[in-house]
Image (spheres, helix red, strand yellow):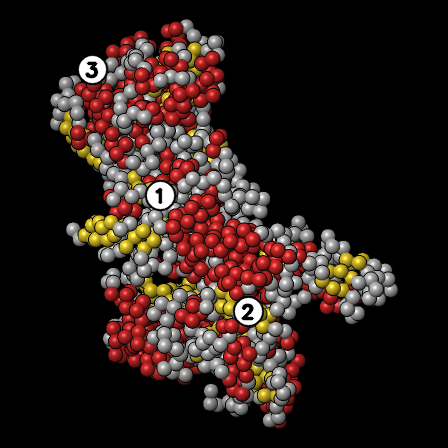
Amino acid sequence: MDKIIIKMKKEVSDKIIEICDRFNNQPGELINVLHQTQDYLGYLPAEAQELIAERLHIPTAKVYGVVSFYSFFTMVPKGKYPISVCMGTACYVRGAEKILDAFTNELKIPVGETDKDGIFSLTSLRCVGACGLAPVALVDGKVFGRLAPANVKDIIKEYREKED
Amino acid sequence: MASYKYHILLCGGTGCTASESPKIKENFQQILAEKNLSEDVQVVTTGCFGFCEKGPIVKILPDNTFYTQVKPEDCREIVDEHIVKGRKVIRLLYENPENKEHISDSKHMGFYKKQMRIALRNCGFIDPENIDEYIARDGYKALASVLEQNDPAATIDIIKKSGLRGRGGAGFPTGLKWELCAKNSADQKYMICNADEGDPGAFMDRSILEGDPHSIIEAMAIGGFCIGATIGLVYIRAEYPLAIHRLQVAIDQAREYGLLGNNIFGTDFSFDIILRYGAGAFVCGEETALIHSMEGQRGEPTFKPPFPAVSGYMKKPSNVNNVETFANIPVIINKGWEWFSSIGTEKSKGTKVFALAGQINNVGLIEVPMGITLREVIYEIGGGIKGGKKFKAVQTGGPSGGCLTEKFLDTPIDYDNLVAAGSMMGSGGMIVMDETSCMVSVAKFYLDFTVEESCGKCTPCRVGNKRLSEILDRITKGNGTMEDLALLKNLSKVIKDTALCGLGQTSPNPVLSTIDNFWDEYVAHVTEKKCPAGQCKALKQYVINAEACKGCTACARNCPVGAIKGTVKMPHEINQELCIKCGTCIEKCKFNAISII
Amino acid sequence: MDTIKLKIDNREIEVPKGTTVLNAAKKLGISIPTLCHFEFKGMDIHNKPGGCRLCVVEVEGRRNLAPACVTECMPDMVVRTNSMRVINARRTVLELMLSDHPNDCLQCSKSGKCELQALAIRFGIRSNPFVGPDHEQSSYQIEVSPSIIRDMNKCVMCRRCEMMCNEMQTVGALSAIERGFPAVVSTAFNQHLDHSPCTFCGQCVAVCPVGALTEVDNTAKVIRAITDESKTVVVQVAPAVRVALGEEFGMKPGSIVTGKLTAALKALGFDYVFDTDWSADLTIMEEGTELLGRLSKHLKGEEVKLPILTSCCPAWVNFFEHQFPDMKELPSTAKSPQQMFGAMAKTYFADKIGVKREDMICVSVMPCLAKKYECGREEFKVNGNPDVDFSITTRELAALIKQANIDFRELPEEQFDSPLGESTGAAVIFGTTGGVIEAAVRTAYEVYTKKPCPKIDFEELRGLEGIRSATIDFDGLPINIGIAHGLKNARKLLEDIKAGKCNFHAIEIMACPGGCIDGGGQPLHHGNGDIIKARWEAIYQADKDMPIRKSHENPSIQTLYKEFLGEPCGHKSHELLHTHYFDRQTTVEVDLNN
């Protein structure tokens, strides 16, 4: 019941308003609006959801209800190099779990989180469709196929070196 | 395609793209330009050829030469030898695993021999971003004839007689579905394409959209005409950027050609297509959930009736079909229902696309006539089990399906036989497992998936699947009891009996089918605290036999978590606390010094 | 009408087309257990997610079990509601639900009234195979707001609260969030209700079948106040309490228990037992005068804010402050009867008995949860001391009476204390939709026309339809009156006003469907619309039973103006009896420092 004023950078709010306008501020376009906002910001912070709710005339609780329902939407900023390990069945039966374990061990973060420097974030996903290359992981959009746990260290090293 | 001497077809599916097919294309173009051959040779990116195991794939026309596992640096040799000198590059040809002979034409490969391509007819043959190539292969002919005939009921009748059933999972007769929707009058109706393929390990729909998007557009327009809809909606996974791009290009081209928009082919019929993006929710494969998601809401299913045919998108009559179902429509119109219904079994007509994956030699996308046996698929098309291991089970139907054993290998594949065997057709994932797969773990894998994907609306799915997964987890950790097995069975049956939607009603199938077919394996976990497949981490330890260990350090160097310690030339030891049981050390040990206990 | 014949448990029945299996079975005396299902007859409130799956039945020819609450009867259907398959399934589903529910019934404020507990008793649950160290339970933080306690670990995802908050009230504070096992109904980002558009109407609490949503319990504060010798404790009771409290003691819905209620409060040890009806009469004097003031300016052609909106309902005030802040000049500035009472008790009455403000504690008994929030608002405090110290609900009062060993049903009737206990029939009807405006008409008519009102019962203003309107002839001057209850209906009227589609002079709005008789603090009705109807009838009966039925004829109100206030809407009134409103809408603004 308190009056809450949310402050937002002008360029960010302008962009979100532009996205909402592009969809005529139609409540039915909520998911499209969220997609484009996440494309722009990399994630969907609470402020962005408040603004979208205001523009589309939907309660914020409903917007959050949608954001928290779909696995594609995230309220956590991704790392500079997002890592996604495919946990589709084809990869699973070819040892994807071990690959995921190796990544969590190497990065020392659980699945779904970003490391403290914001360099790497780790998620699992359903299927990249590169089942012929199973098991597969995506690092910053690049597909690494036919992985073994021993490869994980080298992959991380490769990207860490880029950073240094 | 006539003016060129050669066409180099290059697979542009997601798998091959990941293996540098764009770079290969670039190399070809550059080399051809260097040699002034650009006028004679056309390089075309096509949809998926299906044989993903051997990708990236390059096919040369007109002689149908099929090169496998091509690398960017192979391009020069292909141009120099094949294009310039007319000699095939033998080392890049497919090698028959049985007799080591090289096969040049895909027709003769085991992988393709038993396949029959209807839904995938154009995948790998045409440039999906060029509408002319689709038209050249009878594209939009079916739509033209349907509109010319101007009798929706007659077209629906053709689909009904063809015996086509929904390829999305449950196998509802497509013609009947259209008829039910056509019957309801409304000021607006919607033709919806479900392209939110969510099965883990399945990519049939994506391959069709990437390889032959116009076939879907044409079919949706035909369907729209039949049910009286002027708007089509494609609900597509946001994780499919390439498919989205190709579909968007195709829609734009179709509009340009007047094949979408107002007064198509000069008739009164107008139809256009809008894309809606999914956002990662498996349950949105269920049609009511899909519709709610398209309306911008949580993708929760609602009780039927009302069916979408009565009250669907925006409360208007709507018809939802899956991508593969649509892909069959134009062919049925062009070739006639008699032709289509002559393929397959009594109650399942036509073909089915499967994403064949797992511990099998030929991973890929296949299309086979209904009625083919699992044995033919696994051993002839799939080339048998990888590494000469023993077949254990094949999982069909994705998270809703079941695991079938050896005894079902000669069962002809169709909707009803798979259900009778305790599995289902599903959307077409087919995962082959060998003796190293623990079936309790496999059941748990699927349950974990369902737990994650449950919408949470109904109690049995929200809480029940969670409990199933926890009980399975207990068993894989060696803490299960025989009462747990009884509990699993009863809970599975209750969930099937009481869950709200198809996701929940089928979610216990992996548990029930593995209990039925691999009871002894469950019992071994419970009574002996052993995982017969050696997969359950909690039930095994990797140990180094000090006598056999030469201290070569290979294991320690390769251990991804640094769990192995020891000095050079001295026996090494594994720290069990750190060990993640990945098995790398066993693979790297040259002295057979590491074993699992 | 088309009818359908079917068989339920081997008994034939014929029902109208569209009847659900659940309702058809009910006609045969077969009571199929339900939980999420909620139908509030007469109020157009339906919750049918078909989600709990406790009502499943076996239908011949169907592969799986069917939820009786949403499955419509079909010709020749053969239904079994009690086969072993059904009983096993229901029991398992119930065990699953209980396995993700804290086992703390003994401490739960819903204990004894909880629908889940009742089901566990009905099914004879003695153990649960799905509870144990391997089995996770939800872990959400318990949250306490001024009015409502949310314990989402108890949420069973019946979605009733979500439906109430969104469809009935269009407040939108609640939504289902997350998916799968962690899914519950909560606020945006799981944040505190204070940071949401919640109006504290309490309709979510009124329909919650379990202890996930409950009221903030102030009974301990009451006991502490009464036992504190240094304090003079004054209690006021809202009109709707007297037609509902009896239900908590097994009395028939609609029993008017004013006398017993007064006796019980005296037995509890309150120093003065007064009536909010007294300040309701005062409200009519102030609000009625304000209405006539605005009206006469309007008739003179002056620019004036019309229609005037009532302001007695604190949830409604919260609603417009949050959702329509640009219209906050329209509502009457008159405080609610609860707050007028507090303001008078701690000035006029305290002076009379020579007690200092700080030594007086003012307690209110309300059918409402928003009143708990209202009495804590800063503008209703003097040097940090609130006019009303705290508010308890009808349910909390019942609990206090039970704790104090008072046999409520056998209590001899007593009278309210004087002078803040004297009231009229006009004040009683504040307890239901249309009552406030009817009371205002009874007074405004006579004040404006200076003639006796030709009638007392304005039937045209009564009823339970969501939006009603009537034109009352003020001796040649037609006054257009609108009435809305349920915030969804209030929203419709506000949007009409905004769009200029509205020619009302005065509008009465109450947040709860039916008005205060169905407030969030009333005895739980469990969806039984007949209970609300009975309370509604009782309110009008109580009005009829009063010797004086017009607020301006209340002698103690007349004395109050003579001795203390001067005239309605006069200087002192403005200081003590009127308030102002705030813009509380959440807004996103550009950060100029960035």
From the top left corner, tell me how far across and down residue B452 is, in percent.
Answer: 51, 54
The reply to whether residue C120 is visible in this rendering is yes
Mark 3 and mark 1: Cα distance apart in space: 47 Å
Label 3's element? loop
Residue B437 image offset from top left, x and y in percent: 60, 65
**Residue at disc 2, secondary structure:** strand
- Amino acid type at circle 2 is Ala
Q: Looking at the image, which residue is at 79% across and 69% down?
A: B591
Residue topped by disc 3: C547
The chain under label 2 reads B
Kindly indicate the quadrant of the structure image that contains residue C412. Answer: top left
SS at mark 1 in the image: loop
Residue toward you, B154 or C371: B154
Residue at image mark 2: B393
**Is residue B531 found left or right of B48 in the rendered image?**
right
Mark 1: which amino acid? Pro
Specify the amino acid type for callout 3: Pro
- Give the class, few, some or many, for how many residues have Cα within 10 Å of label 1's Cα (few <14, many ≥20): some
Q: CA distance from mark 2 to mark 1?
A: 42 Å
Residue at position x 53%, y 91% in the image: B63
Task: Determine contact: label 2, label 1, CB under 8 Å.
Answer: no
Determine which residue is flagged by label 1.
C33
